[in-house]
Amino acid sequence: MKPLSRVLLLLALLLAAINLRPGITSLAPLIERIAAELGLSRGLVSLTTALPVLCMGLLAPLAPRIALRFGLERTILVCLGLIGVALGVRLAGHSSLILIGSSVLVGAGIAVAGPLLSGFIKRHFVGQVGRVVGLYSLCMTVGGAAGAVLTTPAMHLLGDDWAHGLAFWALPALGAMLLWLFVPNTRESASEATSGGLPWREPRAWLVTGFFAIQAGLFYALTTWLVARYHEAGLSALHSNALFSSFMLVGLVSAYLLPWLAQRYDNRYLLLMICGLSSALCLTLITFVPTFLPDVWAALLGLGLSGSFALSLVLPLYEAHTPLAVSRWTAMMLFAGYCIGCFAPVLTGLGRDLAGSYQLPFLVLSVLALLMSGLAWCLSPRGKASGAGPA
């Protein structure tokens, strides 16, 4: 491959990755204001986060089939256009129906693009998987952090209207779509087209999916409610938002570094266990003593969860051997993982409404993080050797 085309492909991949999260995370700093202005309960307003995640799960199995019909690269192009249009619709977001409907469309675009971008890496960056996945997950984390951190300033610049702040994120999505117009489209071979469906009968695929489901549920529950938890504990709105920004931004380090370490030292399962244990520790402290060194635990939690997400993206690339097979493993992981994980923000919000505080739902999140570490151990060679996991 010519150097220029390799640079184009990498840039296209990274710009696509940046646009996979702002449509969801941009809601976090404004969610209490949106709920108050639209008269929505916490359980109902959390649908703006839960529904995209549910779509990301339900529609993920369609991705390999659509790619077989239209080509992997062309399908990603259309998905970026769908994300951009859905975010632009939020200009009229002062209706709860429009806001929630746009969230569904954002989730649909992400659902199909996500598995195909993993296949795109497998096709075009053989031998560089660890480094490229590190950059890919880093850009997704950058996009998620940007959505959380920059939406409020964008809102203030655009007339102090939260709908304008949310719609701002249509611009980078449409910009990425324009670049993808120049990415050559490749159809799959006949053998790939007949190589089977999702790996439902693979025990290890279920372990990978279970790990992904928990980390996704934790991330989106915290994306929705972490600011509110800190605010309830007595911290100012400014400090609570700063802690959330820290949670998002420090993950940039682990999002890039951990996939690289996993490839260089072949220790991805040990790193997964460490991420799970550190997340469990931080969530326990946020549950019971949220005002004790909150900056430290918010940062460490960001490192753990971003690291577990980045490493989970690597797992299908080591379990499958062709671009479409990787897309199928990733599609199963996203399908079942997001369908399960999407309930976390809703149940956290309902738990807060029923219990009267965030302590009980955050305690449940702490236990889930501990379970995530157990699944990582089952995936490891040591876990397999002792019979804890499948061969």
Image (cartoon, rainbow, N blue to C red):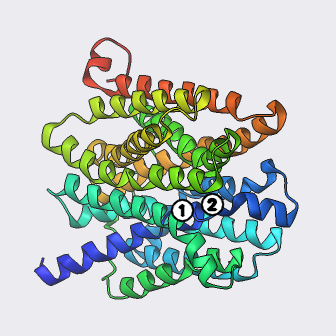
Where does residue 21 sit, x and y in percent of width and height? Answer: 51, 63
Q: Is residue 2 at least partly visible in the picture?
A: no
- Check the image and report above or below for 154 versus 342: below
Sequence-earlier tag: 2 or 1: 2
* Amino acid type, callout 2: Pro
Above or below, 13 against 351 in this view is below
* Residue under label 1: 148
Name which residue type carries label 1. Ala
* Picture residue at 31% right of the left edge, 47% below the top: 254
Circle 1: element type: helix
Q: Residues within 10 Å of mark 1 (few under 14, many from 20)?
A: many
Q: Is residue 311 left or right of residue 241?
A: left
Residue 203 percent coordinates (x, y): 42, 29
Residue situated furthest top in the rendering: 386
Asked which secondary structure carries label 2, the reply is: helix
Instruction: Name the image quarter holding residue 184.
Output: bottom left
Dot label at residue 46? none
- Horizontal side of 244 relative to 161 (left or right) equals left
Residue 218 is left or right of residue 185, and the answer is right
Q: Residue at x 52, y 70 (%)?
A: 150
- How far is the residue under mark 2 from the one under mark 1? 6 Å
Q: Are marks 2 and 1 in contact (CB under 8 Å)?
A: yes
Residue at image mark 2? 29
